[in-house]
Amino acid sequence: MNLEQYIKEKYEGRADWFIEEVQSVSNQQRVMNVMNLKDYLDGKHKILQKPNEKFGGKEYVPRKIVLNHALTLLNFQVSFLLQNPVTITGKERIVKEYQKVNRQGKYDRMNYRILDKMLKYGQVYEYVYFDRNTIKSKLIDASEGYPVWNDENEMIAFVQAYMVDGIDYYVVYSEDTVETYDNKGGELRLTGRYANLSGLPIVYKTTNEINENEGKSELENWISILDSLEDLISKATDAYYKYITGVPVITGQQLKGEGLPDVIGAGLNLDDGATFEFVSNKFDSNAFDTLYETLLNALYTVAHLPAIAVGRTDISNVSTEAVRILYQMALMKAGQNEQYMREGIEQRFEKIRRLLEYKGVTFTDEEFDSLGLVFQYALPSSDKEIIENMKALREMGGLSLQTMIEQNPYVYDVQQELMRLKEENDTRYSSGVDNNTQDVVFNENVDVSRDNT
């Protein structure tokens, strides 16, 4: 079913069909959920809705402690995968062109923002377009984007809807056109129609067991645990101030005075056999520690956050392999997030290829199929150990120069590094330097880089 058939069957061919599409129950429920998640990240937690209490005959405002663990967990997942720029690999000609697009479009920053929004709200959308002959992308927030799916779960259109100063704005994307509308003046009007050169926006989404067309926010897995942590620490603080404070008790007779003095440091004169003490409830700190640690460990487990990353494990004399084992859960989660990002970036590559054709830059299918992505996780490791391992493999002929450079922790642009090595090698030949005295990497670079070209 194409878009025309979809509009005819579901909306009887009405020109303002997209308004009803945006206002459908399923779309509004999804947007409402996104807005609730935004409120949570803004600090509007369940603990703040806790009502006041009566204590000592007066109204008492209980402690309402808000913990911002969610932002820490989200920042860790995003930074662990994308702290280091994504490396584009493939044949030299196409990689060079795509790296140029990547720099001009600031796509390293874009990737970071995409993963951040996707983990927070479950989905985010990217539209690739020309901006004065430069290829760029814009993000469409999950609260503004409305993909249109047909009965075969194929996206046939996309609507962006938002409000500014009481005016509704709509941007309707189809495969060939982009149309803009608003209701300024009280009536819906068409304000522009443009050619759509790159096609429909890209949908980045996480896995959702209920609806495969929508993602699920990571926050939804954590909120119940975070609410319990905030409730526990708030109640414990209240208990300490309300119930732990001692009540002074005197047994026997006071020799002189008119009761307990209010002045700090004053003394009491008691008769023989009289006693004075503070009577209070006991605070079971061990029970509190156990409950709090159990909830915190459950949170870190669900969020795939290694305890070593937040200083909860002694890391003295820990080898690189041991650190990798401690980060195994984080590596598994990063691998999952990588698949979400890889799926979207590969669609971006296809759209960039289409836009480059309008500039007269074309590639063969073989060149395009050679494109690849290398993600370098921010895993604590010994660079010296990595380099020594690569050197040993290189010397025994078990590692190519290009793979060696791709895995080099100090190199982010593989093709540029290969070209620099080739230029250095050519310079040595032209200057008459005896290349037999040079390092094996530079001596062997000529043939390898020539093959790549």
Image (cartoon, rainbow, N blue to C red):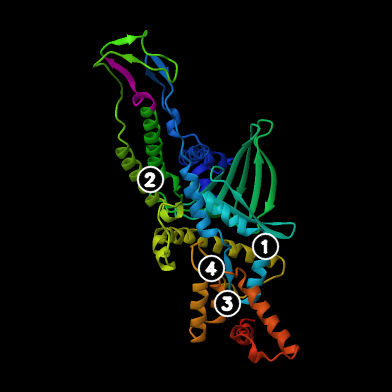
Give the residues drawn in magenta, as a range: 241-251
User: Residue 342, image x and y in percent?
Assistant: 51, 62
Mark 2 lies on residue: 296
Q: Is residue 348 magenta?
A: no
Q: Which of marks 2 and 1 is in front?
A: 2
Name the amino acid type tagged 3: Glu
Real-space Cα distance between discs 3 and 2?
50 Å
Task: Count the marks.
Answer: 4
- Disc assigned to residue 103: 1
Q: Which of marks 4 and 3 is in front?
A: 4
Among numbered discs 3 and 2, the one appearing first in the sequence = 2
Among numbered discs 4 and 2, the one appearing first in the sequence = 2
Mark 3 lies on residue: 366
Real-space Cα distance between discs 4 and 3?
19 Å
346 or 183, which lies in front?
346
Categorize mark 4 by other alpha carbons within 10 Å: few (<14), some (14-19), many (20+). Answer: some
Judge from the rendering whether residue 3 lies leftward or rightward of residue 315; answer left or right. right
Categorize mark 3 by other alpha carbons within 10 Å: few (<14), some (14-19), many (20+). Answer: few
